[in-house]
Image: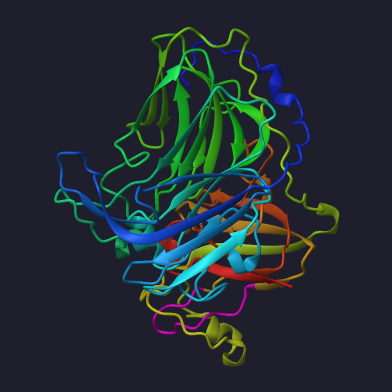
């Protein structure tokens, strides 16, 4: 990213993406996930193993399907508390969305549940449970789902990099995942940074080749500022959805900010033989190397980098002319209104009672002055708004706090239309990072169901910054 002289904009930045290719006959994938405690060498081979929670024998499995394939995923719970699988970013039927109490009963210890769906969008996605997320994802309960079918030209290599911090003491035991100081501010940070369950990723790659990097921020708290040095690269997709490529250097954007749950796909032209490129997080003064790529062999390609390898996304484009407008402000919890029950009235409050894995005993945050229920009143609240299926909604999101919040809407892909800060290309996402004081507008076509809408800093959603829309 630290370029010497200013170069002109590459020719490929303006070219429109070609239309998607219709998928062929769908394949069927039958998976079994056993959520269980397993010993993992997170601190290295010589250090004590860590008792992690994972869905599969290895942490962070990377599962691959093609767009339109049929997935049947059986979840078996071998843990001591209830779990689920939420398929983050996937536009699948609401009953498969994996939110305990809202879209399905919790999968209790010893119990099971089978998710069946066809991913409609290609891209880089992941999955995780939806109650006690700070504790369950904090111990490792998550996986990666790559949905193929968006490439019109195959890159020479692909690399998946999932970043996550661990809150571990030197003895290999987990520290408290939630602290009041963290939960009420920017979050409780890990003590050990990792990429793909290691200290960082080091890969030997073919020289002069096109490498697709699928980068995922699976941390509970951390905001990263991703850049690259030692290689030419372009951003080709955001949250899995292709964009007109943007150079990741001084000709385009030098870095891209990724909050928890956000993904970024890069096309990297690997260095000359013997050369090294580094993908780093430049958020703090001391950059952290996410991945080191060392090139070997004869250069694969001679022609200059052309990162336009993806086809156009297929999610429904919002109809802005007919859009209904809604506005949401994210704040610290107000003292005047304690809960939905008081604000909306006892009669409209649903009677479902949630347990301590889905509510916390403290509340710090609110959306439009309402906070997700806490232990004092653990009833599933009514929706934030009733929406009409098929209609376009244009939401104004305002961050009235001094902290960043990655705001996620389940089951939809939204266009990010405007930002009071600006400087971003045209893109679509399922999670948008609101910087302190930032105002952003998003738009989406509503799909039927009850869809969660929350900050993806896990302590924030657990302490109030969460609600849901009912689309009928
Ligand atoms: Cu990854 Cu409710 O979200
Ligand atoms: Cu937040």
Across and down, in percent, residue 116 comes to 60, 61
How is the model colour-coded?
Answer: rainbow
Residue 65 part of the magenta segment: no
Q: Is residue 410 visible?
A: no
On screen, residue 36 above or below 283: below
Looking at the image, how many numbered discs can be counted on the residues?
Answer: 0
Question: What residue appears at the point 39 percent right and 53 percent down from the top-left corner?
Answer: 56
Residue 54 place in picture, x, y as percent: 36, 55
In this picture, residue 114 sits left or right of residue 389:
left
**In the rendered view, does 246 fall on the left or right side of 281?**
right
- Horizontal placement of 175 versus 427: left or right? left
Residues drawn in magenta: 371-384
Farthest residue toward the right? 321
Query: 277 or 155: which is nearer to us?
Result: 155
Magenta stretch mostly in which secondary structure? Answer: loop
Q: Quadrant of the C terminus?
A: bottom right
Magenta-drawn stretch contains 378: yes
Q: Nearer the viewer, residue 208 or 40?
A: 40
Q: Is residue 13 placed above or below 470 in the rendered structure?
A: above
What residue is drawn where x is 34% and y is 66%? 78
Q: Is residue 342 above or below residue 302?
A: below
Where does the image place residue 277, in percent across and percent down from the top left? 42, 20
Residue 413 image position (x, y, % from top left): 66, 52
In the image, residue 8 sits, relative to residue 40, either above or below, namely above
Of residues 358 and 400, the one drawn nearer to the viewer in this rendering: 358
Q: Is residue 154 left or right of residue 226?
A: right
Residue 355 is at least partly visible in this image: yes
Dividing the picture into quadrants, the one containing residue 183 is: bottom left
């Amino acid at each position: 990213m630290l370029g010497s002289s200013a170069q002109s904009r590459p020719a490929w930045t303006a070219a429109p993406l070609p239309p998607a290719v219709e998928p062929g006959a769908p394949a069927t994938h039958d998976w079994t996930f056993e959520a269980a405690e397993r010993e993992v060498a997170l601190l290295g081979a010589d250090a004590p193993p860590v008792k992690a929670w994972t869905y599969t024998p290895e942490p962070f499995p990377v599962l691959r399907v093609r767009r339109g394939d049929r997935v049947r995923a059986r979840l078996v719970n071998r843990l001591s508390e209830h779990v689920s699988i939420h398929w983050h970013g996937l536009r699948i039927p609401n009953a498969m969305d994996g939110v305990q109490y809202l879209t399905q009963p919790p999968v209790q210890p010893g119990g099971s549940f089978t998710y069946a769906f066809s991913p409609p969008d290609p891209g880089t996605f992941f999955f995780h449970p939806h109650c006690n997320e700070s504790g369950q994802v904090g111990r490792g309960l998550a996986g990666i789902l790559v949905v193929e079918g968006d490439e019109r030209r195959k890159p020479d290599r692909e690399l998946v990099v999932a970043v996550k911090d661990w809150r571990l003491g030197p003895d290999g035991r987990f520290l408290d995942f939630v602290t009041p100081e963290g939960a009420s501010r920017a979050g409780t940070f890990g003590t050990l940074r990792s990429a793909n369950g290691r200290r960082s990723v080091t890969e030997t790659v073919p020289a002069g080749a096109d490498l697709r990097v699928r980068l995922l921020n699976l941390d509970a708290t951390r905001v990263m500022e991703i850049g690259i040095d030692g290689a030419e690269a372009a951003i080709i997709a955001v949250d899995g959805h292709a964009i007109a490529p943007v150079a990741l250097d001084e000709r385009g954007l030098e870095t891209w900010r990724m909050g928890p749950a956000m993904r970024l796909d890069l096309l990297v032209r690997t260095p000359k033989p013997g050369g090294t490129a580094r993908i780093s997080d430049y958020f703090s003064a001391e950059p952290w190397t996410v991945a080191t790529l060392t090139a070997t062999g004869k250069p694969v390609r001679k022609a200059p980098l052309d990162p336009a390898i993806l086809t156009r996304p297929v999610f429904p484009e919002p109809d802005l002319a007919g859009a209904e407008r809604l506005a949401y402000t994210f704040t610290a919890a107000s003292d005047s209104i304690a809960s939905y029950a008081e604000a909306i009235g006892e009669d409209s409050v649903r009677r479902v009672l949630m347990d301590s894995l889905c509510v916390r005993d403290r509340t710090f945050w609110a959306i439009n002055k309402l906070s997700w229920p806490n232990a004092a009143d653990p009833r599933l609240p009514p929706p934030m708004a009733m929406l009409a299926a098929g209609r376009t909604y244009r939401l104004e999101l305002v961050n009235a706090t001094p902290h960043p919040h990655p705001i996620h809407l389940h089951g939809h892909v939204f266009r990010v239309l405007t930002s009071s800060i600006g400087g971003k290309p045209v893109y679509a996402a399922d999670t948008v990072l609101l910087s302190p004081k930032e105002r952003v507008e998003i738009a989406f076509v509503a799909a039927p169901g009850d869809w969660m809408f929350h900050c993806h800093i896990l302590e924030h959603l657990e302490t109030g910054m969460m609600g849901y829309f009912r689309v009928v």
